[in-house]
Amino acid sequence: MSTTSRRGLFLTFEGLDGCGKTTQMHLLAERLRARGETVIETVEPGGTEIGMGIRRILLDPRNDNMGSEAEMLLYFAARAQNVHEVLEPAVARGEIVMSDRWTDSTWAYQGYGRELGTEVVRDLDAIACRGRRPDVTFWIDIDLEASLLRARSRNQERAEQDTRMDDQSRAFYERVYQGYLALEETEPERVVRIDGRGSVETVAERVMAAFEARRGSHV
Ligand code: TMP
């Protein structure tokens, strides 16, 4: 965990749809709060009011003719506002910020899934996030079959909103998964792959152990 960690810590949770990252983030946040840490939880897209508006546009199934470039820029617009409004102030106060998805999702979903490439994702990230990168990223890894199953059952429970991404083809999700694999290979010091199989508690123990290991060796 780099120099930013002394003035707060920025942790992100990543993975395929339905991997359980949201639950795992809440559980880690609760455990750290119980130890007296101040933890801010946020989500991308949607961690600010402006971001919520952008999320509605992005995930609205009626917008199925949205171009890939417009989509990528909207994700970055939401994130830029989050950096401005939530992330930077909290890290400056010395708090722990956790985000449910961040630029690695754009790397995997737009860079690989939409085949826009990773260079443009890096370039836009430098602008939108003002050079701030996560200290540690937990990639909750479940395989594609498990992800598709969970996404489908989640769709049946939800209203029609928030389903545009879930309607993507299988080939798309295969590329997204390749994106996460490549990410781990590219930045092994930051990206921790967590086996997402097993009970919620089992996975939570793995996340906690990985957090302690990183914290112990870097902070
Ligand atoms: P969520 O269900 O985890 O909140 O994510 C919403 C969807 O948005 C999910 O299918 C992944 C997608 N997404 C991208 O395609 N690119 C991004 O940069 C982000 C943050 C999410």
Image: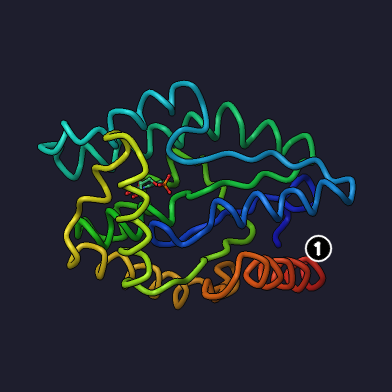
Q: Quadrant of the C terminus?
A: bottom right
Task: Assign the N terminus to one quadrant of the image.
Answer: bottom right
- 217 or 36, which is in the foreground? 36
Farthest residue toward the right? 36
* Residue at 28% in and 58% down: 111
- Residue drawn at 55 percent across, 68 percent down: 191
Question: What is the basis of the colouring in this image?
Answer: rainbow
Quarter of the figure with residue 113: bottom left
Q: Position of residue 140 (x, y in %)?
A: 52, 66
Whether residue 81 is situated above or below residue 87 in the rendered picture:
above
Crowd tier of the residue under label 1, counting other residues whose Cα lies within 10 Å: few below 14, some 14–19, many 20 or above: few
Left or right of residue 7, residue 17 in this image? left
Badge 1 amino acid: Val
Left or right: 51 in relation to 175: right
* Residue at 62 percent of width and 53 percent of height: 25
Q: Position of residue 163 (x, y in %)?
A: 28, 42
Q: How many marks?
A: 1
Residue at the spot 36% in from the left edge and 32% down from the top edge: 55
Q: For the residue with label 1, is its CB less than 8 Å from the closest atom of ligand 1? A: no
Between 130 and 80, the residue placed more toward the observer is 80
For residue 93, above or below residue 146: above
* Residue 137 at x, y percent in the picture: 57, 61
Q: Is residue 63 above or below residue 148?
A: above
Element assignment for label 1? loop
**Residue 98 as seen in the image, left or right of residue 118:** right
Q: Which residue is mark 1?
A: 219
Q: Position of residue 203 (x, y in %)?
A: 62, 70
